[in-house]
Amino acid sequence: MNESPTRDARRMAELLQQQRETYLRLRELADTQRQAIETDQPEDLLRILGRRQQLITELTEINTALEPFRSRWSDLRRQLPAAERMKVGELIEEVQRLLEGILELDRGDCDELQRRTEQFRRNAVGTTRGRMMNAAYAAAAAPGGRPRFLDATDERRA
């Protein structure tokens, strides 16, 4: 890096702030994603996932910009005034908490989507079996569309 250590330290702090803001937006989308799943809104879910992908791309760019600073973190940290050093430490902790929260929400959403997929599959299998049973009953019906076996009360009405 060509900048002075103090400018590098401040640039690192700016990038961490950008990272925090991006994670906050990602967290909001994770909450919105949960609502889309719970209310069975697949179109909204796809839109949200697209927006999340954009934010992940932004985070990748920020992480790439932060990489040179990570290897020099100890030196850069010493260059910051105490208040800024504390602010950077808090940013790092907050970003970590946000990331952990987002990952936890995503795991829950994944579990919920798997549960719903399994329920849909079971319902589809049940529907198919029901249709097969109806077809079997229809095939067993006597000519003229009447069942071969009648209840005694049915015979009196006929």
Image: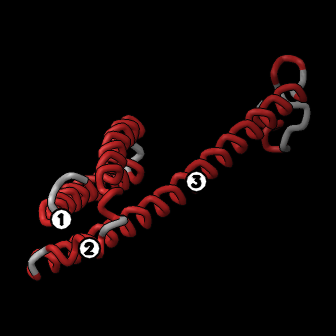
126 or 27: nearer the viewer: 27
The residue at the point 23 percent across, 61 percent down is 16
Q: Is residue 10 above or below residue 154?
A: below
Q: Amino acid at mark 3?
A: Gln
Q: Secondary structure at mark 3?
A: helix
Where residue 81 appears, as percent x and y from the top left, is 9, 78
Q: CA distance from mark 3 to mark 1?
A: 49 Å
Q: Which tag, 1 or 2, sits closer to the chain's start?
A: 1
Q: Which residue is mark 2?
A: 75
Q: CA distance from mark 2 to mark 3?
A: 47 Å
142 or 39: nearer the viewer: 39
Q: Which tag, 2 or 3, sits closer to the chain's start?
A: 2
Instruction: Give yes or no for contact between labels 1 and 2 (Cβ–Cβ under 8 Å).
Output: yes
Q: Which mark is residue 5?
A: 1
57 or 65: nearer the viewer: 65
Q: Which tag, 3 or 1, sits closer to the chain's start?
A: 1
Q: CA distance from mark 1 to mark 2?
A: 8 Å
Q: Is residue 8 above or below residue 74?
A: above
In which quadrant will I find the C terminus? top right
The residue at the point 90 percent across, 24 percent down is 142
Q: Is residue 59 above or below residue 45?
A: below
Where residue 77 appears, as percent x and y from the top left, is 22, 75
Q: Secondary structure at mark 2?
A: helix
Q: Secondary structure at mark 1?
A: helix
Where residue 115 appears, as percent x and y from the top left, is 58, 56
Where residue 69 appears, as percent x and y from the top left, is 29, 61
